Image (tube, grey):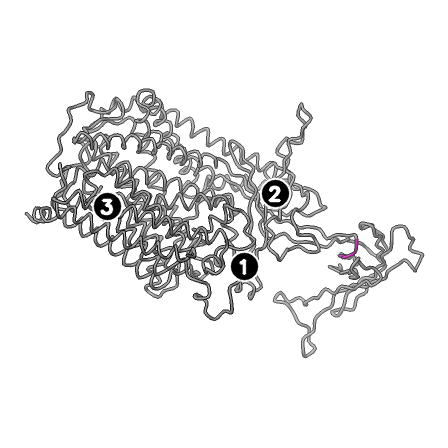
Amino acid sequence: MTPGTIGSTAVFVGLVASILVIIAYVLALWRPSGEALWRSIARACYALTSVSVLTAFGALAYIVYHRLYQYDYAVQHTGNDLHNHWFRLAATWSGQEGSFLLWACWTALIGCVVMLRARRYEARVMPIYTSVIAFLCAILIKQSPYTLFLKAHPGLPGVPSDGFGLTPSLQNYWMTLHPPTIFFGFASLAVPFSYAAAALIWRDYEGWAPRVFPYALLSSAVLGLGLFMGGYWAYETLGWHGFWAWDPVENASFFPWLAVTALAHGLLAQRTRRTMVRTNLFFGLLAFWLFLVGTFLTRSGALASKMPNGQLLSVHAFDNIGKSGLVLMVTMLLFYGIGGLALWLWRLRTMPKRPSMGDSLLSRDFALMLSVLLMGIACAIVTLGSTTPLFLSWLHRPPSAPAPVFYNKAMFPIVLITAFVIACVPWLAWRRTDPEKFKQKLLIPWLIMIAFGFGLFFWVLSSQRAIAAVSDPQVLKDTLHQWMGPGGQRVLVISMASLGFLAALSNAMLAYRVFRKKPLSAGAWIAHVGVGVLIIGVILSNTFERTALVTLKEGQGPVKVFGYTISFEGMTGKPLPERPLDPEYDPENRVMLRITPPGGDRIDASGNSQTFLMEPRWFVPRPSVEEEAQGNPDTMIWPSIKKYVGHDLYIALASQPGVELPYVTMRPRSVTQLGPYRIYYYKAVTRPLQYMGAIIGITDPEQPFNTPDHIVAAEPGIEFVHGPDGSLMRTPQGMPMLVKTGEALPQITDSQGRPGVAILDSLKVGSDEARIAFSLPDLPAMWTIPLSVTYKPGINLVWTGVLLAVAGILLAMVRRAREAQEVEETGFLLPADPDDEEGIDREKPARTPPTQQGKPSRPEPVRAAIRRASRP
């Protein structure tokens, strides 16, 4: 059997087996007498489903890795020039179908864990969960990655010998890490959805919470890690010195994370205070559905179009998935969206409604409720903004997406309040807090925060003054104007950074104290430390960064930017001045720059210089048919980053490097040396409004000018262009249009017989001073390197903050997983157990037996559940 046949068969078997899983589990619920038998059958069918999905993925990976061009997917996503083994493997999930298959694989593997750990909830949860795999297999049957090339393109004569290759921007090691990570997080969102739906069907409003808590934390941690990977990938690859652009596809991963993180906070309130039951069930359903919305948004083709200004709505979006696949995606979206909302509304009256604010606004109860509310508002803002192009396309209006400034303004107050709440939470107790004790405990962190704010204020002024002293004095003036500008924007961002510092400090103090006693209980506080550090990093790196555009010219010396001296040392790769671009796809075009840091020209005790090399990259890949027709192939640019503890020096090419012919500026009857040639400028020749020229002589340096045999005479000039009627054609500025004409020098040729050229670039009227460029053998053209240099302070705090938050969430996940196992083994819901001494429960109370809506000793038959649910 061919790999395509194996893959197609495996997908079909996976679809059939997943349907059998659903049927078997429903029968296990419907017929209690044969429950054990039907459950065994369901487990066997699920194992077959998982093996089938993994086999299908392996078949596609084999096709792509071995470049089997008889399959259309291999032609579209790999090529003979893709030699890196990891990139060849990553090409498996670079397309629509491959990413669907990756999603299905993670869903199947996570489902194995859910099936083994659900125990008495297995038959309730697994039918809902397995339906996701059934939908994905159906999509993969309609949108098969195993389609033969000749079947997909019947008009072509044969199978190609090469593919289109992997998109150059995806040829990065993050391509092997980021998509599998983010899709693992996406797949895990189906677990809270399945538990929430099962809880609504069986009115089990308490028992589901401790079991789903670790899965919600897992989703939050992995999605957060995936978002970090995507941001770092953009930062070190795309050359725009940023890590988050509010791109609709980026947001499609962000708003599910907001929803599942809100769920995790709500589950903590439910576990501790038995509140927010309705909210948690809603967010459990919402997080997965929002992921489906994002999936539809990125794969429907709505984001692949251009806005009226010519820019793409998203640089990450897929093309349209195809009509049949799109219909199944819409069906999936409506099935889980309408079905989940209908379930929630159906059970709304039967859900317990308990106050979630505590006895006082100064309580941890209220802080949790407020945090969930803030994340819900942020989720709504990002979702509505990201889906705007979709709604506009439905209304047949020009597509557009909100600018980043919209999100920045909308999220600013939310982040400000969030930072303040996180800073206060460690010193709050459950239910109520003594105001005097709260003030006492917050006083020292508050004073340290004020000192930090003033220190940051003076640091910003001093750093900008230092930058102004070594580069442009206008920088200091602009900075002071921004400080005094309307709205006090700089004061606001200093305030936010200070609150981020207070949040990190307060939670670090409590995390240290808790970690010494109960390490697993410190996870939440460590995560909050990470959020505070992240806020500081975002403020510093985005608000106080500086970017300068400079141009380096070969042979004209270094330039100074932000105290760094940058000099050009040469080019690597294949491009040469006479052949600036390699049309055969050369990804090794690097510009070698020698960087001397401030004070780095000194030699240390070991005799070593502090200078270092930076090598930003660029190349022009093989153009697509459309790009080749337009004559404007895309240029790929990668930055070079020098990392310091407090900042990054970020250098990228502002545009494609070019070459400039060497030139001289001379007055009549003067002599100058240019490389191995001696240039003599005799006189200027002018005919008003018709022609300007310069008579020059070129000779070998060893020969005197009085030897005519060794002098090459030339008259490069500038001609004025006349229209068809003889009138002088003019530019919009009213000046005559000039055409530079070069004069060939047949006496001077290179090894290939090409003559040298002299070009008059300009001629000053009156003084007859001429600027003349030359293309001569042994006189290479000079590189012109346009650079974007960015001083990025505090950027490492962004990465540190995210990693701290992820580590804290994973630590909390381990703790909640152990609690869930204890609940399953004992049959009792855990009591309120504060993480630290600030809680109201000084002594651990007795365990609470499960309520009637809690975990039953044995799953209730479906018919009995329906009868009981229909009672008023």
Q: Secondary structure at mark 3?
A: helix
In the rendered structure, which disc, 2 or 1, sits on the residue that comes first in sequence?
Answer: 1
- Kindly report the distance in space between the C-alpha atoms of the residues bearing marks 3 and 1: 44 Å
Could you say which is closer to the camera, residue 342 or residue 867? Answer: 867
Q: Which residue is mark 1?
A: 162
- The disc labelled 2 sits on which kind of residue? Glu
Q: Is residue 93 left or right of residue 848?
A: right
Horizontal and vertical percent for residue 787? 60, 47
Bin the neighbour count of mark 3 within 10 Å (Cα to Cα): few under 14, some 14-19, many 20 and up. many
Percent across and percent down for residue 375 are 30, 42
Q: In this view of the protein, which residue sits in the foreground, 17 or 279? A: 17
* CB within 8 Å, label 3 to label 1: no
- x, y percent for residue 354: 15, 37
Q: Does residue 694 belong to the magenta stretch?
A: no
How far is mark 3 from mark 2, CA to CA?
A: 53 Å
> What residue did someone put label 2 on?
615
Tell me the CA gap for discs 2 and 1. 31 Å
- The quadrant of the picture occupied by the N terminus is bottom left
Residue positioned most to the bottom: 725
Residue 497's image quarter? top left
Please tell me whether residue 175 is drawn above or below residue 145 in the rendered image.
above
SS majority, magenta: strand
Which segment did they paint magenta? 773-777
Secondary element type, mark 1: loop
